[in-house]
């Protein structure tokens, strides 16, 4: 899944949780925590892959062996700071990222590519890329089509919710 789509998924998942709990749109800072969590696996793995430290772009940042202890640490720190919701939002973001990297491999039958889930205990082969899901009216439908729909839905909900998180960023940048 492309990095911007992970942000959309993280927002959609966190916004759904907030609404399920009987609240309206997500709060500003919690939204940023969810987006940080959703971005973090790629922020870790893509640069170290580009630098040649690891052979593929899904290794330590996408591994549950890092994600689960990190979620626990962030949750404990957020709770101690009286900001429990930031820990929840971060957990939703990072776990949604990892979870949404799984289905494409299941659909395409590339089960061996799920090695990132327990990397470095399990091997992660080179990523095969976009999967073809079939054809519809003579047009090849790939995972990118689904990702485009997810991205549009995530951005649309974020805008409808009043762009939570944007105010904090603008304030920090001095606008």
Image: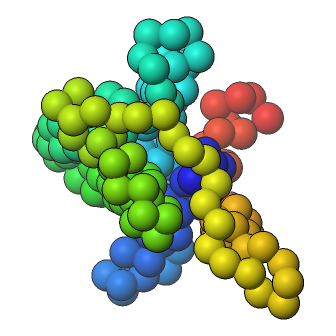
Identify which residue is drawn at 46% across, 70% down: 107
Name the foreground residue: 159 vs 24.
Answer: 159
Up-down relation of residue 86 to residue 56 (above or below): below
The image's colour scheme reads rainbow
Q: Is 141 rendered above or below residue 115?
A: below
User: Dividing the picture into quarters, in which one does residue 143 lie?
Assistant: bottom right
Q: Is residue 117 visible?
A: yes
Residue located 32% across and 81% down the image: 21
- Asked if residue 7 shows in the view, the reply is no
- Give the percent coordinates (x, y) of residue 92: 35, 58
Image location of residue 103, percent across then percent down = 43, 66
In this picture, is 34 found above or below 125? below
Residue 30 locus on image (x, y percent): 43, 54
Left or right of 111, for residue 38: right
The residue nearer to you, when weighing 36 against 164, is 36
Q: Residue at x 21, y 35 (%)?
A: 122
Left/right placement of residue 110 relative to residue 175 reads left
Q: Position of residue 59 (x, y in %)?
A: 37, 30
Going 30% across and 42% down the picture, which residue do you hit?
115
């Amino acid at each position: 899944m492309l990095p911007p789509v992970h942000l959309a998924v993280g927002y959609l998942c966190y916004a759904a949780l907030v609404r399920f709990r009987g609240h309206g749109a997500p709060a500003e800072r919690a939204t940023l925590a969810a987006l940080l969590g959703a971005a973090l696996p790629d922020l870790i793995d893509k640069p170290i892959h580009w630098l040649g430290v690891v052979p593929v772009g899904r290794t330590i940042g996408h591994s549950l062996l890092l994600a689960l202890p990190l979620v626990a640490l962030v949750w404990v720190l957020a709770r101690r700071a009286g900001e429990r919701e930031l820990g929840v939002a971060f957990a939703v973001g990072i776990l949604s990222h990892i979870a949404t990297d799984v289905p494409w491999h299941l659909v395409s039958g590339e089960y061996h590519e799920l090695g990132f889930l327990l990397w470095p205990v399990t091997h992660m082969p080179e990523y095969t890329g976009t999967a073809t899901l079939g054809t519809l009216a003579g047009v090849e439908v790939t995972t990118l089509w689904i990702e485009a729909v997810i991205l549009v839905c995530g951005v649309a909900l974020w805008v409808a919710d009043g762009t939570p998180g944007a105010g904090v960023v603008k304030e920090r940048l001095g606008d």
